[in-house]
Amino acid sequence: MNALLYEYTMPGGHHWSLRMRRGNLLRLTDVAGGANVGMLCYNPENLLERYNAPDTLKAQHTFRLGLGNCLYSDMGRSMASIIEDSHGWHDTVCGNLSKRQCREQYGHHSYQTHRNGWTLSGEESFLVELGKYGLGERDMAANVNFFSKVISDDNGKLHYDDSACQAGAQVTLRFDMDALVLLHSCPHPLNRASEYPRRRVQVQLLTGDPISDGDVCLNHRPENRRALENNRLYYQDARPSFLVDGGQHDSGK
């Protein structure tokens, strides 16, 4: 039984950050459909360790994220695992809506003139949250865009599928490390809507269960076992090794 620790509904076009405790769950729900949730993760004990999109995709032989995928850090550990997913397609290659693109596509609606109706880009949102922790633009790595499906045409051009995300879609992350998590609910950079889409996202924090031998992420790829074993070494857990050879391996990436 997963106990609810906290619940918050993030309005569309807003940003938030929090520290997730290892083993707890973060559940995101697209309340009305068409949401995009940008996310960045950092190790709060060493802010130089952060979510690494290229390693995440390369290690798991995929272009998109979904059930069973781990979110790798640049030190070969799993920062979080996708243990539940009713949407099935989350982008991590397209980055953020920039300040310039936001102004060009949706117009300039400043806080001074529109108060809470201002239009904010994902880039600006992350910079605000990064600044709270002494981080800045150079620390803004490639992010995840939850609930955003991006497909490629025959010419290799990427397109945003605005029909993919239905109301009530959920994704649940188990955090395999303590993590500083930055979130925003700003539009995906490939969303071609002419009016700024404001889509609410429910954020729930829950207690999680220990990783079992049948865990969907542990068994999704052999590389995930190695990443979770690297976590075990980092925290010096007493539980048995995640590796089939009992830990007789090179603990590097």
Image: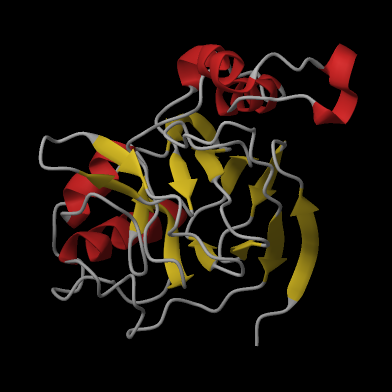
Residue 66 appears at what percent x and percent y? 36, 63
Residue 61 appears at what percent x and percent y? 15, 54
Q: Up-down: is 217 above or below 200?
A: below
For the residue pair 218 and 58, the one nearer the viewer reads as: 58
For the residue pair 64 and 223, the one nearer the viewer reads as: 64
Please identify the quadrant where the C terminus is shown: top left
Residue at 48% x, 51% y: name it: 146
Say left or right for 14 vs 163: right
Residue at 64% x, 33% y: name it: 196
Inspect this view and state whether residue 67 appears: yes
Residue 33: name its quadrant.
Answer: bottom right
Give the total of numbered labels: 0
Say left or right for 149 vs 84: left
Say left or right for 236 vs 226: right
Q: Up-down: is 192 above or below 102?
A: below
For the residue pair 153 and 194, the one nearer the viewer reads as: 194
Residue at 55% x, 68% y: name it: 170
Q: Up-down: is 172 above or below 74?
A: below
Say left or right for 156 vs 205: left
Inspect this view and state whether residue 252 appears: no
